[in-house]
Amino acid sequence: MKNSKPLTFGSLFAGIGGFDLGFERAGMVCKWQVEIDDYATKVLEKHWPNVHRERDIRECGAHNLERVDVICGGFPCQDISYAGLGAGLDGERSGLFFEAIRVVRELRPRIVVLENVAAMLTRGLDRVLGTLASIGFDAEWHCIPASYVGAHHERDRLFIIAYPNRRGVRTPRKTANQRWAANVHVCGACYSGRMGAWWSMEPEPCSVVYGVPGVVDRLRGLGNAVVPQVAEWIGRRIVEAMQ
């Protein structure tokens, strides 16, 4: 029998809620969000008015965040992107990854989902996986472009799925790349047929956060956001696996 109780999740570096929207569409329930940007926070307040919210990840932990089944977060990419100076995880912004790890270590979720630019493959993935291993988590990873879910642009992003390695979660028989490669290559047509066509083209910025001013802020929010359709696809795979 499947577990009828929905999975709960908490969102680090929530931005304008890309992960949150996708995971909710997959059937999960958002319990808290952490976001420091003023504009993004206004968007979250508009669409998730009843969700507990904190601003600074450096001030978050087990003392003010509820334990959840899944913790997700697209940690800052500025120091990892090829467009930056290449400081990587030693950079001031991308180094906030270690704050996310501290929160994971304190709350011990069943699943962790991390997102960043594809450049992470050569600019820090080894440290990310090693750090996760140091707190008892195994991981799988793969790059999933937005075009796989019907977008008209590539927007290639790295997604890392981690889970405790000593708490009864079976280690996959296939390697990470083999496992993901067997599942992520879904074209837009297949996605629409299996999950319902709820996007047909790139949305206008104003349509995403209608009622909140600031064109520059809207564009930055969209640029930093996780594509909700990709998050939903991942969320559905997590729900299927956990239930």
Image (cartoon, grey):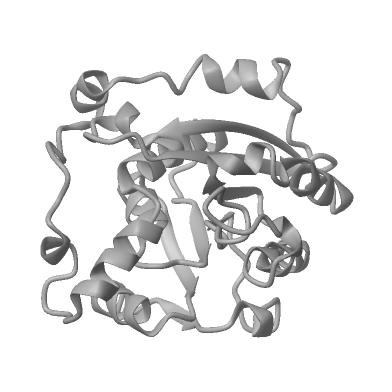
Is residue 2 or residue 90 the one in the foreground? 90
Left-right relation of 227 to 176: left
Q: Whole-percent x and y of residue 99?
A: 71, 70
Is residue 56 depicted above or below 209 in this figure?
A: below
Q: Is residue 161 visible?
A: no
Q: Whole-percent x and y of residue 31?
A: 47, 69
Residue appearing at x 24%, y 78% in the figure = 46
Q: Is residue 128 visible?
A: yes
Is residue 10 depicted above or below 171 in this figure?
A: below
Q: Whole-percent x and y of residue 157?
A: 48, 40
Is residue 70 or residue 150 the one in the foreground? 150
Q: How many marks?
A: 0
Can you tell which quarter of the image residue 140 is in? top right
Residue appearing at x 84%, y 45% in the figure = 130
Is residue 88 or residue 139 the one in the foreground? 88
Is residue 105 depicted above or below 184 in this figure?
A: below
Left-right relation of 83 to 134: left
Q: Whole-percent x and y of residue 243?
A: 52, 36
Residue appearing at x 40%, y 60% in the figure = 224
Is residue 159 or residue 47 the one in the foreground? 159
Residue appearing at x 63%, y 67% in the figure = 67
Can you tell which quarter of the image residue 29 is in? bottom left
Left-right relation of 136 to 185: right
Can you tell which quarter of the image residue 86 is in? bottom right
